[in-house]
Amino acid sequence: MQANPKNLFDQFTKLARNVKQDFKNKGLVVPSRLPNGDIQVGTYVINRKNHLYYIRDKNQQLQAGPLNLAQTAVVVANDLALGRGVDATMVRNDAWYGYREFDEQIATHIADVARKEKDYNRAEISQHKAVIAQEQKLQYKRSIDTRYNKLCKLT
């Protein structure tokens, strides 16, 4: 006895629906890639523009963004798709990550210019500021990665 192709397709569709629902019950909405490269999580779309991430709903209304890290965008979009709302702490940590990254870039640039001008005191102070900004940036990234890794462990 051979399986009817329509019956087989229906069984496969039901299985896929059940798997997605199981993941959703665990706290993970299964993402999918759209033809234009954006990522869809439930009814929310993550798109990237100018090295920043934005989350829009199906009506193209901005829900979150600009976000610096893809990990933040994934976690926030997953929370929105589950009906939880935007995690303000996560978004704030992402913003501070961006501020510290900018501070690090500026301090590093100033240190490089000061070295070329042989102003070693200024170069050392700026390099020290860059190291502090880098450590703070990594601290914010670790807090975001902690939440992202918890989400990844659900799979």
Image (spheres, rainbow, N blue to C red):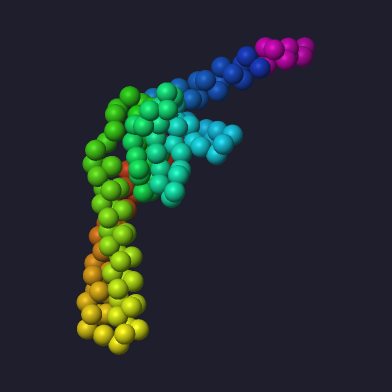
Outermost residue, right side: 1
Q: Is residue 136 above or below residue 147?
A: below
Query: x%, y% of residue 20?
Result: 48, 25
Q: Toward the viewer: 76 or 27?
A: 76
User: Left of 12 or right of it: where is 119?
Assistant: left
Q: Is residue 46 above or below residue 98?
A: above
User: Left of 120 or right of it: where is 8?
Assistant: right
Quarter of the image where the C terminus is located: top left
Q: Determine if the magenta segment contains residue 3.
A: yes
The number of numbered badges drawn on the structure is 0
Quarter of the image where the N terminus is located: top right
Q: Toward the viewer: 135 or 36?
A: 36
Q: Is residue 78 visible?
A: no
Choose top left, top right, bottom left or bottom right for residue 29. Answer: top left
Choose top left, top right, bottom left or bottom right for residue 99. Answer: bottom left
Query: x%, y% of residue 129?
Result: 23, 70
Q: Toward the viewer: 93 or 125?
A: 125
User: Left of 7 or right of it: where is 22?
Assistant: left
Outermost residue, front side: 117
Query: x%, y% of residue 122?
Result: 23, 80
Q: Residue at x 29, y 53 (%)?
A: 97
Q: Residue at x 27, y 62 (%)?
A: 103
Q: Determine if the magenta segment contains residue 54.
A: no
Q: Residue at x 30, y 73 (%)?
A: 110
Q: Which residues are magenta?
A: 1-8
Q: Toward the viewer: 4 or 72?
A: 72
Q: Residue at x 56, y 36 (%)?
A: 36
User: Left of 99 or right of it: where is 28?
Assistant: right
Q: Is residue 40 visible?
A: yes
Query: x%, y% of residue 89?
Result: 23, 41
Choose top left, top right, bottom left or bottom right for residue 90. Answer: top left
